[in-house]
């Protein structure tokens, strides 16, 4: 494959960040580090928040600089070579769909994107009168598409069972396991199965840490660590029997929140690989670096295009934040795959920010018929699984108040009369009515529809390409730009609500082993206490007791997680007990008296003489080694 040095990138990319320099937060993998860009995002205004997110997302496309670090980036030759190799494998399998299968799998956001991608490419095949060739698995099953189901992420055997079931009867399977931090046991189990059956499976691991930063702690009840599995895949990579695609894209804007850059880059990578494979099959052509680079560059242009609307995005962030601050709601009303993007964004707020599932919700036209998920209609499982416009109009709309924020998401190919009708119904309850739509240079939204919305983000694209794959490129670009805007709205709103401390998700839900470990790291970082002391405080917060018996101390981590997954403000409570050296009940009282978590912790820091001064912040911001 040729080097990419001859290609000029369209969008502006930042200078290498401090995170690339030797010595920066060496105790953490890249995906768990804090991003220096967003260090003070918790005290920023909406426009600053959006600018920070823009800069962080631009790091996805930053080129490799061997003078700074040896991290491989999206445009690095070795990453492009791996992408091309996987595209060629997909091309081979797509030629014989009866005997072969492409499986995408992940946990949380990665699993939801696996579902979305599998659905999109099956629809592409359906439009060509071809047989579906894609399947997906997600830890927790289809319930995890709408709600947080994070405990199954820790179960490698469950992943193995699901993969064996869907691949039964197939001769060849291309398995793409997505784990942004190279950490999910569910995916590790599936990759291990593939490694042991290379006559049938070609394993592909997608993530955003180097292999030496893969999760190395033991997986409870299993024989390997994720790092050991990744090392085995690396050996197969050298033999062209398996592949790792793991560009470094920098720390997340909110530390560890892989729903953001990790999710966006997953979408960019896999759409580029798979659409290139489809085009090669249709045209009976070869896969080249030019094909891959042209598509990657088009996604970089999407970044430039969507963030040209930063002022309006910031306005939506401001109003969404005001809604959450008043304990009101954010609703996304979307059409087709853009509605699904809204549902995905909403589902991520519970584990990330400790939010209530009702605070941010997404709805899509035709509900589960539009989703077309494996298990069909799940609305009988509870209100959090009711995702149709019909449910919204019948059940949610009568409860909407003036302080709620409602965002419509659509394209001009959708039913504009229906959109206008629903918008007027919503406007009768709240003036906080906003929209994001996608149009082309040839077609614009009718003025009478535009005037309904207080603020509208009109994202204009070049004329729709006539070829089938071309229309899918544009649909994928609509989805990515929508994802970036909704991520900004929900993240910015929770920042403004005080759910973020510096750039850390201080009120995360401790619902799997990864988040348990992250909670421990946060306690150590913000209190300066030993790991053992922080572990004890975390358990005291989980079990709401100041006295821990030996039985509690010695049970498996999974038992603590089962208990913690149902609890609120576990980490903030532990932080306060450590800072104030107080009881759990006193910590809860302090938090209850100051509902903004960030402010409550700041107040405790001040009372203990621990709050960082402006001078200390400046010291913290110095580059490593200064």
Image: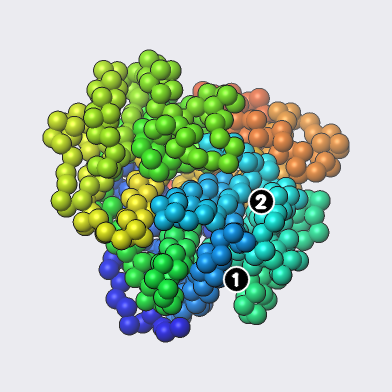
Extreme residue toward the bottom, this view: 2
Q: Earlier in the sequence, mark 1 or mark 2?
A: 2
Percent across and percent down for residue 74 are 44, 69
Q: Relative to 7, does residue 150 appear above or below in the rendering?
A: above
Q: Which residue is mark 1?
A: 243
Which quarter shows the N terminus?
A: bottom left
**Residue 389 seen in this snapshot:** yes
Mark 1–mark 2 distance (CA, rounded to whole Å): 21 Å
The color scheme shown is rainbow
Q: Relative to 103, does residue 172 appear above or below in the rendering?
A: below
- Secondary structure under badge 2? helix
**Residue 614 seen in this snapshot:** no
Extreme residue toward the top, this view: 398
- Marks 1 and 2 in Cβ contact (< 8 Å): no
Out of 70 and 114, give the one closest to the viewer: 114
Percent across and percent down for residue 137 are 61, 49
Q: Quadrant of residue 202?
A: bottom right
Q: Which residue is mark 2?
A: 166
Q: Relative to 129, does residue 571 appear above or below in the rendering?
A: above
- Secondary structure under badge 1? strand
Percent across and percent down for residue 601 are 52, 36
Out of 60 and 123, give the one closest to the viewer: 123
Q: Quadrant of residue 174?
A: bottom right
Which residue is drawn at the image coordinates 26% and 18% (left, top)?
428
Percent across and percent down for residue 94 are 52, 64
Which residue is drawn at the image coordinates 36% and 82% (left, top)?
5
Which residue is drawn at the image coordinates 32% and 82% (left, top)?
6
Q: Determine which of the numbered discs, if any, sits on residue 279 in the image.
A: none
């Amino acid at each position: 494959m040729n080097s990419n040095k001859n290609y000029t990138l369209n969008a502006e990319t930042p200078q290498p960040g401090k995170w690339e320099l030797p010595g920066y937060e060496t105790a953490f993998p890249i995906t768990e580090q804090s991003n220096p860009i967003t260090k003070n995002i918790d005290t920023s205004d909406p426009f600053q928040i959006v600018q920070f997110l823009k800069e962080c997302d631009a790091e996805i496309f930053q080129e490799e600089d061997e003078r700074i670090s040896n991290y491989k980036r999206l445009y690095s030759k070795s990453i492009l070579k791996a992408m091309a190799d996987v595209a060629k494998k997909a091309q081979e399998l797509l030629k014989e769909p009866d005997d072969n299968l492409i499986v995408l799998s992940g946990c949380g956001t990665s699993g939801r994107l696996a579902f979305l991608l599998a659905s999109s490419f099956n629809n592409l095949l359906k439009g060509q009168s071809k047989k579906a060739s894609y399947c997906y698995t997600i830890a927790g099953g289809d319930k995890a598409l709408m709600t947080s189901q994070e405990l199954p992420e820790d179960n490698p055997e469950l992943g193995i069972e699901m993969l064996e079931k869907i691949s039964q009867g197939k001769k060849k399977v291309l398995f793409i396991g997505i784990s942004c931090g190279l950490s999910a046991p569910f995916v590790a189990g599936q990759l291990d199965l593939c490694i042991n059956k290379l006559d049938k499976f070609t394993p592909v691991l997608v993530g955003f840490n180097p292999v030496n930063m893969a999760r190395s702690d033991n997986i409870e009840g299993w024989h390997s660590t994720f790092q050991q599995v990744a090392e085995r895949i690396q050996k197969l990579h050298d033999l062209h029997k398996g592949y790792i695609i793991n560009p470094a894209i920098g720390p997340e804007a909110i530390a560890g929140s892989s729903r953001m850059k990790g999710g966006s880059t997953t979408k960019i990578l896999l759409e580029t690989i798979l659409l290139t494979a489809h085009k090669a099959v249709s045209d009976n052509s070869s896969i080249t670096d030019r094909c891959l680079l042209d598509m990657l560059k088009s996604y970089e242009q999407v970044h430039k295009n969507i963030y040209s609307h930063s002022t309006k995005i910031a306005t939506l962030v401001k109003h969404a934040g005001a809604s959450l601050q008043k304990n009101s709601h954010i609703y996304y009303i979307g059409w087709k795959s853009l509605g699904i993007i809204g549902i995905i964004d909403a589902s991520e707020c519970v584990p990330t920010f400790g939010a209530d599932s009702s605070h941010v919700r997404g709805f899509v036209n035709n509900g589960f018929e539009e989703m077309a998920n494996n298990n069909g209609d799940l609305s009988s499982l509870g209100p959090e699984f009711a995702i149709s416009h019909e449910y919204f109009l019948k059940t949610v709309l009568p409860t909407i108040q003036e302080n709620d924020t409602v965002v419509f998401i659509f394209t001009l190919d959708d039913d504009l009369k229906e959109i206008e009708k629903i918008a007027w119904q919503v406007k009768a309850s709240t003036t906080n009515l906003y929209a994001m739509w996608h149009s082309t240079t040839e077609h614009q939204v009718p003025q009478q529809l535009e005037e309904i919305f207080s603020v509208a983000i009109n994202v204009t694209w070049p004329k729709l390409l006539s070829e089938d794959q071309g229309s899918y490129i544009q649909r994928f670009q609509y989805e990515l730009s929508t994802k970036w805007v909704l991520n900004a709205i929900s993240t910015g709103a929770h920042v403004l609500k005080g759910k973020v401390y510096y750039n850390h998700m201080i009120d995360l839900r401790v619902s799997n082993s990864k988040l348990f470990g992250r909670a421990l790291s946060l306690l150590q970082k913000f209190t300066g206490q030993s790991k053992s002391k922080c572990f004890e405080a975390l358990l005291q917060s989980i079990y709401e007791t100041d006295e821990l018996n030996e039985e509690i101390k010695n049970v498996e981590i999974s038992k603590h997680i089962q208990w913690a997954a149902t609890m609120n403000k576990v980490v903030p409570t532990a932080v306060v007990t450590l800072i104030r050296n107080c009881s759990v009940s006193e910590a809860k009282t302090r938090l209850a008296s100051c509902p903004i978590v960030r402010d409550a912790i700041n107040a405790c820091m001040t009372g203990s003489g621990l709050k960082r001064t402006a001078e200390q912040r400046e010291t913290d911001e110095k580059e490593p080694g200064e």
